[in-house]
Amino acid sequence: MTRLSIRIDLGPGHRVGPGKVRLLEAVAEHGSISAAGRALGMSYRRAWTLIEALNAGFGRPVVEAQAGGRAGGGARLSSFGAGLVADYRALERAAERAAAPFLARLSGPDDAPRDHPAQENPADIAQEY
């Protein structure tokens, strides 16, 4: 299956892509970094490290954690983190709509003849999108 994946490089070592966004969604869904990591098949340490990298890269928290205690700890997305997820998903939907004709050509039946995109005039391709 051909699909589009968006990764945004914001600087050296600072990226946002589908994996980190899915981790943020899992934190919102499960209310904890540990549970989010488990749901995605990663350790708490890995999940925490990815979230800390996002917090440091943006210079503000994407996740706000509460220390444990009698009531238990937890985590939730900050307003910035929630906006980041919403904006990323909106960008992803817009890119998928824009790329749909190109992706359809790439994922046609295996026996269907199709032109290789490199053989096309780039100006013609730009007109389609």
Image (tube, grey):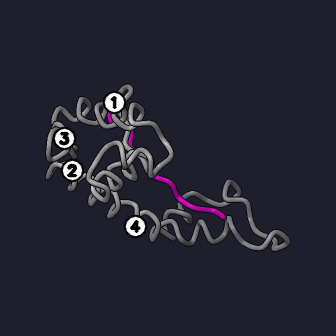
Q: Nearer the viewer, mark 1 or mark 2?
A: 2
Q: Position of residue 114 (x, y in %)?
A: 76, 69
Considering the numbered disc 2 on the image, is that residue within a helix, a strand or a loop?
strand
Position of the N terminus, as image quadrant, is bottom right
Residue stretch in magenta: 1-10
Front in this rendered view, residue 75 or 71: 71
Q: Earlier in the sequence, mark 4 or mark 3?
A: 3
Look at mark 1 in the image and give the residue it sits on: 11
Which disc, if any, is residue 93? 4
Q: Nearer the viewer, mark 3 or mark 2?
A: 3
Q: Earlier in the sequence, mark 3 or mark 1?
A: 1
Residue at horizontal 38 percent and vertical 38 percent from the top: 47
Most extreme residue toward the front, as rendered?
70
Residue count near mark 3 (Cα–Cα under 10 Å), binned few <14, some 14–19, many ≥20: some
Residue count near mark 1 (Cα–Cα under 10 Å), binned few <14, some 14–19, many ≥20: few
Cα distance between the residues tagged 2 and 4 = 21 Å
Q: Earlier in the sequence, mark 3 or mark 2?
A: 3
Look at mark 2 in the image and give the residue it sits on: 77
